[in-house]
Every structure is written in structure tokens, then in C-alpha cells.
Amino acid sequence: GAGVSQTPSNKVTEKGKYVELRCDPISGHTALYWYRQSLGQGPEFLIYFQGTGAADDSGLPNDRFFAVRPEGSVSTLKIQRTERGDSAVYLCASSPKAGVGNNEQFFGPGTRLTVL
Amino acid sequence: GENVEQHPSTLSVQEGDSAVIKCTYSDSASNYFPWYKQELGKRPQLIIDIRSNVGEKKDQRIAVTLNKTAKHFSLHITETQPEDSAVYFCASSSGNTGKLIFGQGTTLQVKP
């Protein structure tokens, strides 16, 4: 079946611009996660959705970052007033549900964001 | 805060040898420990995971051990092959969110 997909695969923008990154999770997965991976580092947690609500946004670095999942499926990560330090690969992952007993997360291919 | 330390950062072995990667976690409430393999430019792929009620798990050439008392867990790859070359990440999670805290990664090179 189809895995997690993310669009665009690459995004180049200029400092100060607004960007949106999209994630399509595996059908039926209620848990959705966003991570950010800088070069040579492990993924860093940004935000977690259970259904439509953001259950944990403790990883968002500041208020320029926001994410939505209005219908409990597709999610969009939004970054305002981009900075060069935002350049990274943004990974999305989905899981059948969060919590004990069902934690395996399936990752998308990521969106490589470059802020010039 | 929650933290996962991973060692070594790079590991080079001869084909057929074993490779061991070690991780230490800080959150004693952690109850799930996956290992991901990531090839250059690709997505992380789960290769094995272990839960806190189990001390060891094996899948063909790959095994993971967990020491809850010491808050250590390790990945063991036996009979390494060149296609095992990649970056390996350990991670831990706890609580109801399932969010993963990743280690810094180990670049494994298997020389033919």
C-alpha cells in the first residue's frame, strides 16, 4: 500500500518568506508527527497530532512555526518569516495510534528546505 | 530534558565482522526503543524495536538488548554485509504521545 508522502521534495526560498510543507500519512493512521533533521544529526521532534488536534507541540522552536491537520489526515507545516537556520529536512511520520502497544512510526521521504 | 546519547559516531568494520552500537537514555519512563537505518538521501526505515518489558530481541542478523536499570540499549549486527552501510539511529519514547527522541546517529561502513 501507499506509504507516507510529502510535498514538495525540495523547497528553496528566500529569507523572510512564508512556506508550507505538506504531509499525507498512511490511510487510517491517526497519529502524525513532524520532525526536523539537520545535516549529520538525528531527527528532532516538532509536533504530534492525534486526529485533528495538536496533542504535543513542545518541539516547535518558536511562534514562526505552526502546523494544522484539519480533517485528521493531511497535515501542513507552516513556517513564517523563514530564516537561514530553518534550512533542514522536514520529516513527517505516521502511526496507527500513539501510546503503549502501537508505537511504530513510518516516515515520509522528507522535504528539503533551503533558505537563502 | 529527555536525551539519548549514541556511540560511536562512526564505525568501520570488515565484511563478515560484527558491529555494535550503544545508546543511553535519560528518561526513566521510556518504554519503547526503535532503531532506524537511514541511507543517504532516504527516509529512516525501522529495522528493529524493543519494548521495556523485554530484555532482548533478535531478527536474523540483527539483535537489540535493553538494560532498564542502566538505561542502556544496544544494536548488534552480525555477519555484516556492504549493504548494511548506512547511518543508524537509536530512539526512545515514553508516555502517551509516542514522540521519538533520537540519538545523534552512527555512520556504519562495511568494507568488502
Image (cartoon, helix red, strand yellow):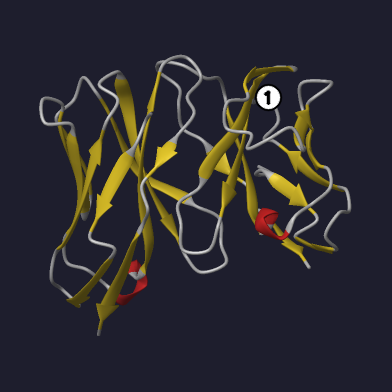
Q: Is residue A21 above or below residue B26?
A: below
Residue at x-position 26% and y-position 76%: B110
Q: Is residue B85 left or right of residue A5?
A: left
In the image, B51 versus B101, the foreground residue is: B101
- For residue A115, side relative to residue B44 (left or right): right
The amino acid type of the residue labelled 1 equals: Gly
Residue sitting at x 76%, y 62%: A115
Q: Is residue B38 above or below residue B52?
A: below
Q: Is residue B7 left or right of residue A57?
A: left
What residue occupies the far right of the structure in this picture?
A17
On screen, residue B28 above or below B78: above
The relative height of residue B75 versus residue A98 in the rendered view (above or below) is below
Q: Position of residue A2 (x, y in %)?
A: 69, 44
Q: Position of residue A80 (x, y in %)?
A: 83, 43
The quadrant of the rendering that contains the N terminus of chain B is top left
Q: Secondary structure at mark 1?
A: loop
In which quarter of the view is residue A32 placed?
A: top right
What's the chain of the residue with tag 1? A
Residue drawn at x 85%, y 63% is A14
Q: Is residue A109 visible?
A: no
- Quarter of the C terminus of chain B within the rendering: bottom left
Q: Position of residue B94 (x, y in %)?
A: 38, 21
Q: Is residue A46 left or right of residue B80?
A: right
Res B94 seen here: yes
Q: Residues within 10 Å of mark 1 (few under 14, many from 20)?
A: few
Quarter occupied by residue B57: top left
Q: Which residue is mark 1?
A: A28
Q: Residue B90, percent across and down?
A: 34, 45
- How many labels sit on residues? 1
Q: Which residue is at a point 53% across and 63% down the rendered structure image?
A: A39
Q: Residue B29 versus residue A8: which sits nearer the camera?
A: B29
